[in-house]
Image (tube, helix red, strand yellow):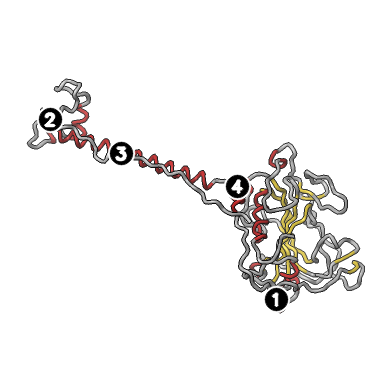
Amino acid sequence: KATAAPMVQPTVVFSYPATIPMVPAGAPVYPNAPAAAPPNVENVAHETGRNNPANQTGHNNNSTHPKGSNTGGLLASLILGALLIATLVLCAMTLSKVTSMESPSTMLREHNTMKPPLGNNICAGQKPESPNIACTDAAINEQAGADVTEGVEGLFETTAAPLTEPYWKMGLCPVNVHWHQGTEHRSAGQYDENGMGPTKRRAGRQGFHCHLYDDSDPRFTTEFDWQHCKDMKVGETYEVHWPHSKGGACNTPNQYQTPFYDGVFCIPENLGETPSSVGVQAQIFTIVNDEAYYWPDLFRGMIVEGQMGSDMAFYTGSTTGDGRNNEICSTYAPITWQVDRKCHLISASTFDKMCADMKAQRDDMTD
């Protein structure tokens, strides 16, 4: 649990005399100059209207005007004070700007991961029993297709129709977030068998890499000081999934659940046909150590901004996981999949913030 330390900002104080010194009565305005011709006196007289006969009424043009001299000193002091105040304001603005530009990775050390008050988790244990079956079983429904390249069509005939509108418009809320190292899906030229990353293919199944990795660029090779996520690596490709459901405990402290099935089936009476009631968002990222790619709220759903979330594949399939392959299939089908075909850069601090948000949920999402 991180404890936020109070931020102390320096205070700048300036002072000036309580009383502004005045020129003594009768003292010459320019004591070191000839009395008849003080320097620039004509310009001063023209600007102030003091020694210009055309602007005078009952004044002696040869007098030194001590009262006018006091006024000039006061004016100069006021101008000086105004300049000092303006300088202090600019300094304060600069200090505020520098403080506000503190890097997200530094601010994460003060992120509050305290959970909400203890309460009844109505979603716990709601995952239904539905064992995997052989893909050759006659009762099998469509499975999550790997290839979402534009123009590619699957071979399984189905009458199920996916949701093509954003889930929030259709009454579904996110109930979990998790991710896979390497992608489960394939998008030719974006994340596929020709992609690159910092790690070699490990034993067993590993997903595809994006094409963004550059080992000559320190953004992809400078490791990040992870505070909340485990077993993450800068430069690696990750596919993030946000399961959504109409049966979730939406807008309550129990909305986010692990395993995600508890969240999907939390309120089963709210579920209808599965393609219109259950769906997954998927978005693919390569992690960089660069705060220019920081997003503060990846926990709550995929990013839809500019190129992000603009080229989408929609299809009906099944839930996925390492326990399913071309021989063993899922019986959680059909559901809607909405997959971003593009790969995007994202900062390591974005993922670390997401992990911190997961720690702050009522249900234990640390696994």
User: Residue 301: which quarter of the image?
Assistant: bottom right
The amino acid beneath tag 2 is: Gly
Residue 267 has which mark?
1
Query: Label 4 vs label 1: CA separation?
Result: 39 Å
The amino acid beneath tag 1 is: Ile
Which quarter of the rendering shows the N terminus?
bottom right
Which quarter of the rendering shows the C terminus?
bottom right
Q: Residue at x 45, y 45 (%)?
A: 93
Residue 26 has which mark?
2
Q: Dot 2: few (<14), some (14–19), or many (≥20) neighbours within 10 Å?
A: few
- Helix, strand or loop under label 1: loop
First along the sequence among labels 2 and 3: 3
First along the sequence among labels 2 and 1: 2
The amino acid beneath tag 3 is: Tyr
First along the sequence among labels 4 and 2: 2
Where residue 107 appears, x then y in whole percent? 59, 50
The amino acid beneath tag 4 is: Thr
Q: Are marks 4 and 3 in contact (CB under 8 Å)?
A: no
Where residue 64 appears, x then y in whole percent? 13, 29
- Helix, strand or loop under label 2: loop
- Helix, strand or loop under label 3: loop
Residue 165 visible somewhere in the drawing: no
Q: Are marks 4 and 1 in contact (CB under 8 Å)?
A: no
Residue at which label 3 appears = 16
Q: Dot 3: few (<14), some (14–19), or many (≥20) neighbours within 10 Å?
A: few
Front in this rendered view, residue 287 or 148 = 287
Q: Is residue 308 left or right of residue 41?
A: right
Q: Are marks 2 and 3 in contact (CB under 8 Å)?
A: no
Residue at which label 4 appears = 106
Q: Dot 4: few (<14), some (14–19), or many (≥20) neighbours within 10 Å?
A: few
First along the sequence among labels 3 and 1: 3
